[in-house]
Image (cartoon, helix red, strand yellow):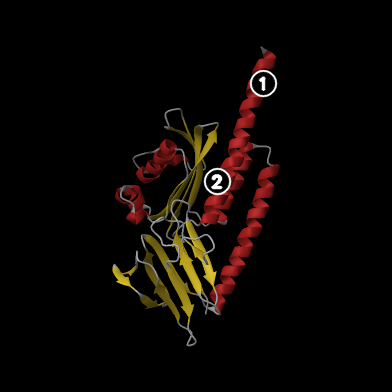
């Protein structure tokens, strides 16, 4: 049966590959690898996946850096239903897929692509910014499987001003984990993906992360020029364990569209003031 390989490709999210029987697959840093891992500590040809005649997938280490399972270095390992590995420093999960699981995954991928096309079309047609934001928030919750999503505006000091979609995030005492993520994103001015909050040195200690069982969080800055004016925030609780690179790409695409809309509104506002002066 096929195997799904999930790579923790921080900071851009998780990458997923579905591999089928009939050939060997190379895992490594080179762009033409069957499973490509963009990490300097991963060898150019780091490992190989082979499907044996008896139906078993075998993982084989080809590197000097090493591969690890349960903190022990391995050279060759059979892939069971779910196998967790470290390829160098990078977390990797290999999962066997039954025919039904594969069909379900394919159908979900097709559905998500159709949803993305539909939502993208709606966003382009939206003249009202509130509707525009509502459309994107619905996509995050319905299609990406997020538990909560909102657009959080920040001031010139990167302090939270207001939130569209989940206003209670302004309460730092109750949502210390979310506000910590928002502050980190605002200060760094770049996309922030935390795909396992339990392993994060700061977030894992936050009461709101523990209480609300937040599994993963995503923050994308919305900029006008070089200034961060808002942050697109989403998180997941239990049902979805991580954000993929496709999820992150959509979030960043929406943030760019919103940045253009805010810039356009700002220019119109300035032109109106000039005309009335």
Vertical order, 196 against 105 (above or below): above
Q: Position of residue 23 (x, y in %)?
A: 54, 77
**In terms of image quadrants, where is residue 101?**
bottom right
Give me the residue at 50% from left, 47% from top.
149
Q: Secondary structure at mark 2?
A: helix
Up the image or down, 229 lies above or below 101; here it is above
Disc on the earlier residue, 2 or 1:
2
Q: Secondary structure at mark 1?
A: helix
Q: Label 2 vs label 1: CA separation?
A: 28 Å
Q: Nearer the viewer, residue 152 or 86?
A: 86
Q: Point out the residue furthest to the bottom here.
A: 54
For the point 47% across and 54% down, which residue is it? 13
**Is 113 on the left-hand or right-hand side of 228?**
right
Image quadrant where one finds the C terminus: top right
Number of numbered discs: 2
**Camera sees residue 122:** yes
Residue 134 place in picture, x, y as percent: 59, 44
Residue shown at the point (37%, 42%) measured from the top left? 180
**Which residue is the site of mark 2?**
252
Is 143 in front, or is 263? 263
Image quadrant where residue 78 sits: bottom left
Query: Where does residue 60 sit, x and y in percent of width and height?
Result: 40, 74
Question: In the displayed structure, would residue 29 be above or below residue 191?
Answer: below
Mark 1, Cα crowd under 10 Å, few <14 / some 14-19 / many 20+, is few
Residue at 35%, 43% (x, y): give it: 176
According to the image, label 1 marks what residue? 271
């Amino acid at each position: 049966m096929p195997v799904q390989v999930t790579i923790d490709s921080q900071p851009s999210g998780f990458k997923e590959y579905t591999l089928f029987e009939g050939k060997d697959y190379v895992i490594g840093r080179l762009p033409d690898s069957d499973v490509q891992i963009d990490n300097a500590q991963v060898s150019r040809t780091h490992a190989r996946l082979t499907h044996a005649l008896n139906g078993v997938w075998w993982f084989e280490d080809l590197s000097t850096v090493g591969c690890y399972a349960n903190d022990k270095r391995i050279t060759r390992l059979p892939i069971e239903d779910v196998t967790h590995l470290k390829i160098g420093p990078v977390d990797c999960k290999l999962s066997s897929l039954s025919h039904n699981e594969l069909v379900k995954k394919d159908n979900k991928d097709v559905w998500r692509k159709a949803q993305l096309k539909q939502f993208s079309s709606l966003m382009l047609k939206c003249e009202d910014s509130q509707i525009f934001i509502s459309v994107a928030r619905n996509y995050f919750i319905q299609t990406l499987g997020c538990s909560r999503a909102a657009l959080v505006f920040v001031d010139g000091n990167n302090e939270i001003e207001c939130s569209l979609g989940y206003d209670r995030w302004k309460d730092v005492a109750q949502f210390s984990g979310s506000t910590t993520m928002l502050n980190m994103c605002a200060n760094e001015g770049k996309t922030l993906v935390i795909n396992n909050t339990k392993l994060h040195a700061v977030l894992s200690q936050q009461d709101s992360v523990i209480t609300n069982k937040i599994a993963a969080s995503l923050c994308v800055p919305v900029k006008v020029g070089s200034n961060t004016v808002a942050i697109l925030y989403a998180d997941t609780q239990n049902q979805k364990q991580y954000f993929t690179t496709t999820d992150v790409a959509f979030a960043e695409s929406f943030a760019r569209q919103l940045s253009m809309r805010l810039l356009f509104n700002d220019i119109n506002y300035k032109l109106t003031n000039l005309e009335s002066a």
